[in-house]
Image: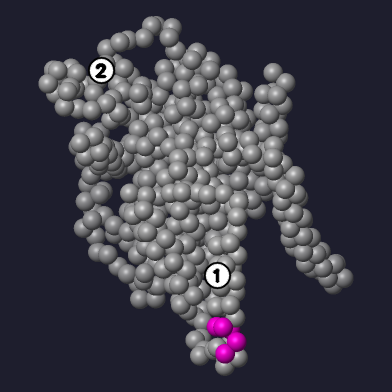
Amino acid sequence: MHLILFLVFAGLCLAGAINLLLQTHPINSALSLIVVMTSLAVLYLLLGAEFLAAAQVIVYAGAIMVLFTFVVMLLNAGREERTLGSRVARSIGFPAVVAILAVIATVILHAQGLGVARLGDGITTTDELSAVLFTKLLLPFEVTSVLILIAILGAVALARHGSGDQAERTGEE
Amino acid sequence: MTILWFILWSVLKVAVITVVMLLAVAYTVLLERKLVGRIQNRWGPSRVGPFGLLQPLVDGAKSFLKEDIIPAGVYRPLYLLAPILALGCSLILIGVVPFGDPSVELHDFAVLCGPWIASLVPRGLYLFQISDVNVGLLVILGVTSIGVYGIALAGWSSNNKYSLLGALRSSAQLVSYELALGLSLVGVVLRAGTLNLRLIVEQQGTRGFLSWNIFGGMQFVAFFIYLMAAYAETNRSPFDLPEAESELTGGYHTEYSSMKFAMFFMAEYGNMINVGCVATLLFLGGWTNPFGNWFGTSQNILVRALLPLFWFVLKVFCFLFLYVWVRGTLPRFRYDQLMNFGWRWLMPLAILNIVATSLWLALR
């Protein structure tokens, strides 16, 4: 049962990712990305990470991708023009991708102590997850939140800068 | 054998509950038209059936029979997908809501019919909840956030400026108020220590309405934040800017006709019911008896099954009544007022509520 679900959603995830690259219309690509995100959430759920699955849907599919589609709509981005790709990209790009994938694959295959997760292992509850986050991993957790705060402050600073200029300009006039 | 029973039972439950939900949506529309009529000193629908009770069925038939127009300039795949997405997200939520006492099983009823049938029906087939999910609250928030796409894609794919403006307003409003909504629920989760809706309700059932989260849990601030954010989330008056008729002709569903328009309409009323269900579960004690054990508890299986259902429906009905009352009373917000209210008042207030609740829980 778990294996069937895994195959279905892994297939959906890959199909979404390939479709994302092949589509020429930005909104179709954005929607394929949503398919990828939600099928990833199902894969997390199959590995027993229910909180992560829900958070994946709420944060990535629900919030971040809404902003993506928002931008596509506001700019009314049109169809991409299909180019045949430059010769450099084809002669260097493909071998480089294969090399990188090979390196990553060997590193993962040789890595020890990464821990094991099997399909249908049983569910890690939110209690257990938060206990780990707020005791063992407290420092990385807080540092990450500071990092996000810095990004928010940066965005606010950029946005305020623009409107401040405008106010000065209208004041001069 | 039990797996087969489980699948059959689930399919049956889903089918019945979907039909009930659709009927509830239809009659919520009638309730709104009747009540708003009375608020405005007129009768509301009164011609079809006694007291106009058959009006929703006639309206449904009308939507089916109307001509389905697809304008020439639309982006077809998304134009067709959008109403399905909107209605699907609004109907799917009831799947995690415990709307009656979830410990009542089919087996309890089979026992009444005789020992032979009781031996046939296995235990564990619960009546009043489709699925008991550990992170039920997060599932609700997740599905709600996916529901935004229905509106956003409808507006964009219609290729019409009013639709696009309506969709943009709506998505901006939903994203802004989802924050306040999510934060207002954190207080409840902190108190309950779980995200499971059934357990959250059971913790509120010990001393009648005194142990509801809104009274005994001191979450009334959170409740009012939730109430206002919920009005905005469902695009209802006084936050109905996405479909402000005087400014946008119809908002995101301007270009939709026939059953596709009706699907958006049903999605909106379905979302009202969902929001009412969530408010009932989290703040008003869900299916539990507001009088607790004051009048004793009955052992009769029929009473045990139907009384919680009655309380749940009554609470949701009160919430829907309030919705319509507000719509009949308050004028629409201006757009900048809406955004200011959401970001400068509701969100800081929700964060303060979290801090206060955590302090109270820590120092208690």
Give the secondary structure at mark 2.
helix
Magenta residues (range): A91-95
Q: Which residue bears the numbered disc 1?
A: A72
| Nearest to the observer: residue A123 or residue A98 | A98
| Nearest to the observer: residue B355 or residue A73 | B355
- Quadrant location of the N terminus of chain B in the rendered image: top left
- Pointer 1 local density, CA inside 10 Å: few below 14, some 14–19, many at least 20: some
Residue A6: x percent and y percent? Answer: 39, 55
Does A171 sit above or below residue A24?
A: above
- Left or right of B306: which side holds B321? right
Residue A57: x percent and y percent? Answer: 50, 52
What label does residue B302 carry, if any? Answer: 2
* Of the two numbered discs 1 and 2 in the rendering, the one whose residue sits closer to the viewer: 2
- Left or right of A127: which side holds B266? left
In this rendering, does residue A114 appear at all? yes
Give the secondary structure at mark 1.
helix
Q: Tell me the amino acid under the disc marked 2.
A: Leu
Q: Chain of mark 2?
A: B
Residue beneath the point at 58% across and 18% down:
B216
- Pointer 2 local density, CA inside 10 Å: few below 14, some 14–19, many at least 20: few
Residue B99: x percent and y percent? Answer: 37, 30
Q: Tell me the amino acid under the disc marked 1.
A: Val
> In the figure, residue B113 lies in which quadrant?
top left
Q: Chain of mark 1?
A: A
Does B354 sit above or below residue B298?
A: below
Does A82 sit above or below residue B141?
A: below
